[in-house]
Amino acid sequence: MISLFRAVAGAFALLVVAPVFAAVVAPVGGAAAQGWPARTVKFVVPLGPSSGADITARLLSERLQGKWGHPVIVENRAGGDGLVGITAFLSANDDHTLFFGPTASYTAHPWTRTSIPYNAKDIIPIVRTTVTVVAISVPTSLGINSLQELVAKARKEPGKMNWSAVTGLNDFQFSSFVKLSGIDMAKVPYRDLNQAVNDLGENRIQVYSSAFATVRPAVLGGKVKVIALNNSTRFEQILPGVPTAREAGFPALEFDGLVGIHGMPNVSAEARKRIVTDVIEVLKDPKIAERLTSGGTVVVPGDTAEFTKAIDSQRRTAEATGKALGLKPVQ
């Protein structure tokens, strides 16, 4: 009887424990099967609202949350020469927090900073989304139509003109342009892109280097004129007749505004593959391309290898600028 009681008790124990064990194990297996993402995804944008990267991030977030089954939010962390956004991204140390922005936010840091408070190897390129049309703009009231005219006017009026640029490679290259051209222009820093555009339109600053998307409303309003593009090619569909800086005789100002999604090393290979696949698929939608192009951003999707190669090229551009100025890199 005792043996029979023990056998029955043992069987009963198995019946009780088995469902509990299954309940514990099942969610783990389910989560593994579900894969990335398992929760809300955050895009950290190192620029403010209305910037080209911000517009792209918000447009993609709307489409991607439908694919991923979780919210995709955009967080603007502007300022500090891109460091505010980069620090927010890296300090999260989370495979669901991604850096969505222009690579120009960090490729010039070895040449523009006395120290870099992050390890560049922790910023892992995942997928290129777009190329930003980067414009050199002036107030329409200034009466300037080209970079040559700008330099000539600055030389005639030393110390009377002001310039500004989006932080990062934009700022670095335009600063070197001012120095190497031998002109005396004061730099005016801005954290608020919209304030910079307002001051440009009112002729309080005379030159601004930024994404065309940022100055587009002022251009359409007739207060601002684009005189050249930093990009390596023209974009006739967006700014017909506007030459590149190289065509205008200033090749040192040339760089392409790469924008894409980055992660930390803790983002798994499977997660990166899904991000690449889904982002490129979303960008194939003609409506996406039409909406972005109208705002001054060109859809040029690229996988991880393509994105990495383009970033390496941009780093070489920053290096050439730094060496031309006699600088040595921090890292």
Image (spheres, helix red, strand yellow):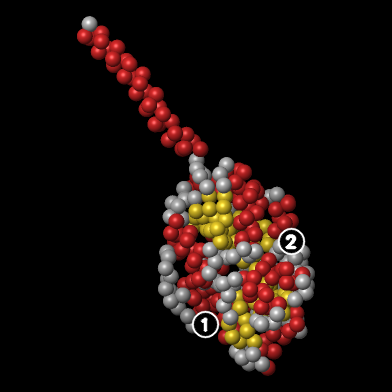
> To which quarter of the image does residue 318 belong?
bottom right
Point out the image quarter for the N terminus: top left
Q: Can I make out residue 125 in this image?
A: no
Q: Nearer the viewer, residue 129 or 160?
A: 160
- Provide the secondary structure element on which disc 1 rests: loop
The residue that label 1 is drawn on is 325
Q: Amino acid at mark 2?
A: Ser
Report x, y in % for residue 324. Answer: 53, 81
Report x, y in % for residue 280. Answer: 63, 50
Q: Residue at x 45, y 59 (%)?
A: 90
Is 249 drawn above or below residue 40 in the view shown?
A: below
Q: Nearer the viewer, residue 259 or 315?
A: 259
Q: Residues within 10 Å of mark 1 (few under 14, many from 20)?
A: some
**Gap between marks 1 and 2, in whole Å?**
36 Å
The residue that label 2 is drawn on is 294
Q: Can I make out residue 238 in this image?
A: yes
